[in-house]
């Protein structure tokens, strides 16, 4: 299955490349493709310059859509061209995965209305304010509602991706990938230990 | 401080972007720059096309050198041009950090001779065979020997980077960054739970 990754200026580095590392390990099953509205090089504040293709050049319907978060989402929620494109592609996709504040972009499209979803715990109020018709879950590490997978902040995207692999191909394969990358997978999607934790508590 | 990241074809995605996410959070302290021998776009099997500058264009001595691993290292250990460049830059740097099989490249330069170091536990035999004059530590999550930081596989690079932050700026800052990215930092550098674990054990 092809994973269509929606890139925009000032995406969060690990929101993208955590899931990419995990899907990328399963070369027999997944292919990763990077797209953006304008195509070409997309950049973020960490200095990561990624080559993308134009979303318009996408010929087939996406099988899996991956939407990262990052500070760029603060601008992109006000970009109807991107939100409309996300809506169009998400409706066609078999699955839609968002990481961190990527769920704000999907929520803005209206497709999460009445559905359970989560997001970054440090940007939660802002994300919720983008669409109050979503049933925002502040406790979850990640949430599955039908074809929509939404994760909490940054590294939670890796846990969600392993959860997605487990749901599709069994828990053994997810554990094998986690083992290969020496990653301690947080398997409990319903409990994010960061949901209530303030920095002063740690 | 500027972090000089050495890129080559078929680097491991998370070896690079885990540390980048962490250093990138500390914009007041660190700047990230991507370099390769030839410059231009560097690619890996996950389909990540990164824009790099030519190593020759590096004008000042590097402050921190970051060397990722990945399957590409199997070829690059036999590339004297890259190994010599790594040696030259590592000698000038204040600190050198390697992730996963990146330590094989550094070991090949001879700079780890007589020093403690570690690497990916699944490629350990191959890494050790690159230079038997290194004191390879199979138990560690990451190892510090003077200015050299070497980590175990893939996601261990994030733990090492947080350890590096803790060593330079105090544990509080490292914990704050881990909290911001909702990452469960494995703080114990001396014990990698993956060191003896086989896939059948999990």
Image: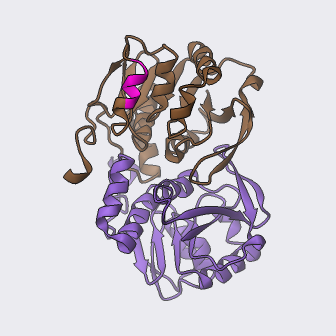
Chain colours: A purple, B brown
> What residue is shown at x 43% (from left), y 25% (from top)?
B149
Number of numbered tags placed on the structure image: 0
Most foreground residue, A42 or B116:
B116
Q: B199 above or below A94?
A: above
Q: Is residue B129 magenta?
A: yes
Question: Which residue is located at x 27 percent, y 37 percent?
Answer: B195
Rendered location of residue B45, percent (x, y): 57, 50
Q: Quadrant of the N terminus of chain A?
A: bottom right
Give the camera-side residue of B75 and A200.
B75
A112 lies above or below A3 = below
Task: Left or right? Give the position of A84 relative to A162.
Answer: right
In the image, residue A64 lies in the stretch drawn in magenta = no
Instruction: Work out whether residue A139 can be spotted.
Output: no
Point 51% across, 71% down: residue: A97
Place of residue B103 in the rendered image (x, y in percent of width and height, measured from the top left): 46, 27
Q: From this viewpoint, which residue is outermost toward the left?
A: B201
Residue B88: image location, x then y, percent: 62, 14
Decide if residue A13 is in sight here.
Answer: yes
Q: In the picture provided, is A155 more to the left or to the right than A39?
A: left
Looking at the image, which residue is at 49% across and 19% down?
A: B108
Relative to A12, is B173 on the left or the right? Answer: left
Q: Which residues are magenta?
A: B126-131
Q: Main secondary structure of the magenta part?
A: helix
Q: Which picture quadrant has residue B171?
A: top left
Whole-percent x, y for residue B154 in the image: 43, 42
């Amino acid at each position: 299955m092809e994973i269509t990754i929606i890139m925009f200026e000032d995406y969060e580095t690990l929101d993208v490349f955590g899931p990419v590392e995990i899907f990328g390990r399963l070369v027999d099953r997944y292919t990763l493709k990077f797209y953006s509205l304008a195509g070409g090089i997309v950049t973020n504040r960490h200095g990561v310059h990624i080559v993308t293709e134009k979303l318009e050049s996408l010929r087939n319907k996406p099988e899996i859509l991956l939407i990262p978060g990052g500070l760029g989402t603060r601008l992109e929620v006000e970009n109807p061209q991107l939100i409309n494109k996300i809506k169009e592609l998400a409706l066609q996709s078999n699955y839609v995965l968002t990481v961190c504040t990527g769920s704000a972009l999907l929520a803005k499209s209206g497709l999460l209305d009445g559905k359970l979803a989560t997001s970054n715990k440090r940007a939660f109020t802002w994300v919720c304010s983008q669409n109050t018709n979503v049933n925002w879950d502040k406790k979850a590490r990640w949430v599955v509602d039908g074809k929509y997978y939404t994760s909490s902040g940054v590294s939670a995207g890796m846990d969600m991706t392993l959860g997605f692999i487990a749901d599709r191909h069994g828990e053994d394969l997810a554990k094998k990938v986690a083992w290969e990358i020496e990653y301690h997978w947080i398997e409990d999607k319903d409990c994010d230990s960061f949901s209530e934790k303030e920095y002063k508590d740690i």
